[in-house]
Each structure stands twice: as C-alpha cells, then as structure tokens.
Amino acid sequence: MTVSYTAEVATCRRFGCFWKLLIRWRASIYKIIWVDLLTFLTCFYFMAIVYRFALRECDRVIFEDIVMYCHSYGNMIPLSFVLGFYVSIIVERWWSQYTTVPWPDPLAVYVSALVRGQDEHGRLMRRTIMRYMCLALTMVLSMISPVIKRRFPTYEQLIEVGLLNANEANIIKAMDVKFPKHPKYWMPIIWASSIVTRARKEGRIWDDFSLKSMIDELNKFRSGCNMLTHYDMISVPLVYTQVVTLAVYTYFFAAIFGHQWIDRESTTANYQNMVNYYFPVFSTLEFFFFMGWLKVAETLICPFGDDDDDFELNWVIDRNLQVSYLIVDEMHNDHPQLVRDQYWDEVFPNELPYLVEAERAEHPEASTARLPLAKPHPHPSTTVAKSDETDWTDFDAEHEADNELKIRFAPRQFKFSNSSISISDSLGGDTIDMLDEEGDELGSQFSSQDDFELLKVEREKQRMDRQIQHAALTLELIRSELGSEGSASEASEASKKRGQEVQTDKSYTSQTKKDKDQEKDKDHEDKE
C-alpha cells in the first residue's frame, strides 16, 4: 500500500519538515537502491586496488589512459534530460491509473434512491446490482495485478468470498469456451443493466430519466474498467525504457573508471585528489540521485504490483463490497429525524465557535481589497470651459427650495431652400448653414460625384430631416405642457369665482329672509 506521510509534513517549522522522513526505511530510497549502490562501490574499490597494487608500471599507464578517456567523454551522455523526461511521463501515468480505477459509490447512491421497494424482491435487486459491479472490477484487477491474481486465481475463489454464484460462474465458463480470446469482465455489468431495466418495467423506478441516469453510471463504470485493461496492454514505448536504462548504467560503468584516483598530473583535470583516494564522495552522491531516479520510474511504471508504493487493491475490493451493501441495504430510505438546527432563529451564524478562541483567523480578502487608489483627476479634454455662448439653462432662485429645475429653450428658426438648410436662434443670432451652395453648383457637383458620394449626401439630408422632426416634436411637447398649465390656472380662478358667487348668493338669500321676517313682525304688531 502507498506509504502516507501527509500528517508529518502538514506544518513546516524551523529547518523544514522533510528531515524526519529521511530516517524511514519502508518505501525509501535506501531500500530500493542499496543493492545497486553496494555493487557500484564494490566494483569501484576493486578497480582501485587493482590499479594500486596489482598492475605493472606499463599496465598502469594504459589504465590511466582509460581513466582519462572515461572522465573526458563520460559527461557527454545527456543523463539529466533523458531521465527527467522519462520520470515525468511515468509519474503522470501513475496518477492517471489511480484516477481511472472506478468506484461504485455513485451508482450505489443512484440505486438506493431510485430503485424503490421495501420487500425482499426490491432488496434483492439492489444488492445484486452492486454485487455485479464489484465482481466486474475484481475480474479486471485479477487480469492486471499479480496480487489480485494470487488471491482469486479461479472462479471458485470468487464463489467462496460471495462475489459470484455457482450458476453465474457456469454461464461465464460457457462463454469462455465459446469465445476464449476475449475477457468477460463486462458480463456482470450487462446483468446489472438488465436488472435495472426490469425494475423500470415493474414500476420500481419512477421514470425514464432515472433509468437513463443509472444506465449512464453503469457505462461510466464500464469505461473505467476498460481503461484499466488499456493501461495494462499499452505501456510506455519499450525503446524509451531501453534508452533510459542503457544511459544510466553506461554512465556509471564509465564512472567506475573515470572517477578513479591516478598518479598522473594533468592540466585539464585533477586526478590526484586525496579525498577520492579514500572514498568517492561525489561519485556516490551522483549514483544515489540518478540511480534513485531510475528506481522511482521502475517502481511507478506499474502500480498494481507488490512494491511498497503500489496501490492496495485488496483493500479496494473489500471496501467496495462493504460500502455498496451499506448504502443500498442498511441505509436505504433511512435518515435521521428532522429537527431544527441551533441557528434556526438566526437564519445563519455570523461566526462559528472555536475550541481555542486564539486559533480564530481573519477571513481571507480579495487581493485588491486594500489596494491604495489615487484620487481621480479630470482629463483636460473633459473639463467644461467657460465660453461666451448663450446658456439655455436658468435656475429660478425662488423655487430652489422645491428642487425644481426649469429649462428655457431658445426659439429657433428653420429655413429651407432647394440647395441649403439654415438654423438660427433669435437670441444670439447665430446661423448654421447646412448646405450653402447654389442649386446649379450642387447639381453640377452631383453630376461629377459617383454613386457613393450621392448616397452619403442623401443620408446626410435624411439625418437632418430627422433632427428637424425631433426639434418640432419637442416644441410641440413644450407648447402642450405650457397650455395645460395655463388651463389649469384658469380653471382654478374660475372655481374661485364660482365659490365667491355662491357665497354672495347665500348671503343675499339669508338677508332677504331676515327682511321678510321683520316685515311680518311689523304687520302683526299693526294688527294688534
């Protein structure tokens, strides 16, 4: 199983957190490389002893020439480039193989939610579907992993662990006899799809969309299994692996001679270094790094084997079956009682509590949240300069408190002719001539212009017509508004007059009544 050390490097302190990992042995570089390193040092010291104690003087000259030759031309091998590119390909392939391994959890959620029925038949359908999916993955892994093949060499072992029934094994064996050349890992997936279709016909699946969702998930699972077989059949090109292997071993074979201490002076290299006389320090480090790099590629090129960093596929098989049965059977249509959460009245919490309040950190902000910004300065071209032109806006000081804005438009006069259009205002007397050429000159000019120029002139006239129409419409709107205000004022005055007349009439009628009453009193007194 892959050795995990994430918890030990979660926080970096002082001189780093990788130093504590150097003392590990399992899945370490020492465990992988110690045999090769011991062989390299043995050969290195053997040649040193032969040169110093066994060779004659004439033979030592030949040996020294070999050392100088290997030292000069050994660095011509592009070991870093070839090995680095190869290892990057292997690491990417290694992670892709792990992400390709299908997991039955999404399908188990679909089956538990969409395949209804609390009876025994519904439960049997759900459990059988997930057992078939786990069986398909186990059959694929037994094809590509020696570890799983040793655990399940035949169908009998699958029957013993409960992934396969005897009648199902007989069907697969019969298919193997008829079609021996192709693997049969896809047969359990076909059986699972048939059960899903049957559940739809029996009404245990609500609608066709739910059926399609489950079939899509089955196909996704089958695609992952199929991709695993492709990774097994199609490896990194053999020629590239051979080139890398030959480059590494050839380089260090030349280093056994080229890094030796010899008793000869040279102007291009120092072969009399006393450190190298006792122990090749940097030759050992170089072997450690480059050979360790190659061993990493050898370990990761197939992550389904017995290496320390290979995937734990036995755990995957056991876990998939247990979790699948737990989802579709034990937790089917079951959930805790619905109760109000502790933030029910607050809608949402402003701050969640901490066990240690000192560990509360500030919330992250956007990168430009505290960016100092300079005050904007208006561009000179955008500033409004004072001019002698007539200002058509007038703010009435009397109505300033009412926040009322009055705009006074200057009357304009439009003059039309066959050859020109002029607009003039009555206040300033400025006149704008749109076309001030005579009709004859315009006609001669039109005759000399091409169609495109004629079209431009026509478009300009149309634009001016639209502007004139808009101006006339604006003038009419202003007149109508002024007329409505005048009529409203007249109506208010008329209503006031009517009110006064009514009051006078009432006073007159009351006075006449009083006079009549007085006359009646006088007549009565006279009669008496």
Image (cartoon, rainbow, N blue to C red):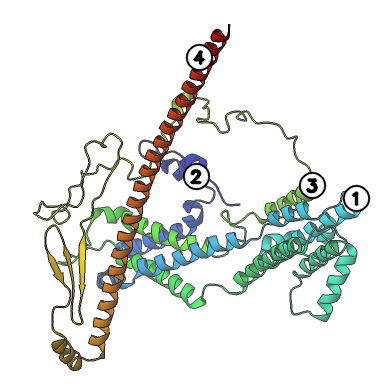
The nearer-to-camera label among 4 and 3 is 4
Rounded to the nearest whole Å, what is the CA distance between mark 3 and mark 2? 45 Å
Q: Residue at x 40, y 71 (%)?
A: 247
**Which three-letter amino acid code belongs to the residue tagged 1?**
Asp
The nearer-to-camera label among 4 and 1 is 4
The answer to which of marks 3 and 2 sits earlier in the sequence is: 2
Rounded to the nearest whole Å, what is the CA distance between mark 1 and mark 2? 54 Å
Location of mark 2 (residue): 24
The nearer-to-camera label among 3 and 2 is 3
The nearer-to-camera label among 1 and 2 is 1
Residue 61 drawn at (x, y percent): 24, 72
Q: Tell me the SS state at disc 1.
A: loop
Looking at the image, residue 59 sits to the left or right of residue 82; the answer is left
Note whether 416 is above or below 285 in the view shown.
below
Rounded to the nearest whole Å, what is the CA distance between mark 4 and mark 2? 133 Å
Location of mark 4 (residue): 518
Location of mark 3 (residue): 332
The answer to which of marks 4 and 3 sits earlier in the sequence is: 3
Do we see residue 162 in this rendering? no
| Labels 1 & 3 near each other (Cβ < 8 A) | no
Looking at the image, residue 46 sits to the left or right of residue 522; the answer is left
Residue 50 drawn at (x, y percent): 35, 64
Do we see residue 419 in this rendering? yes
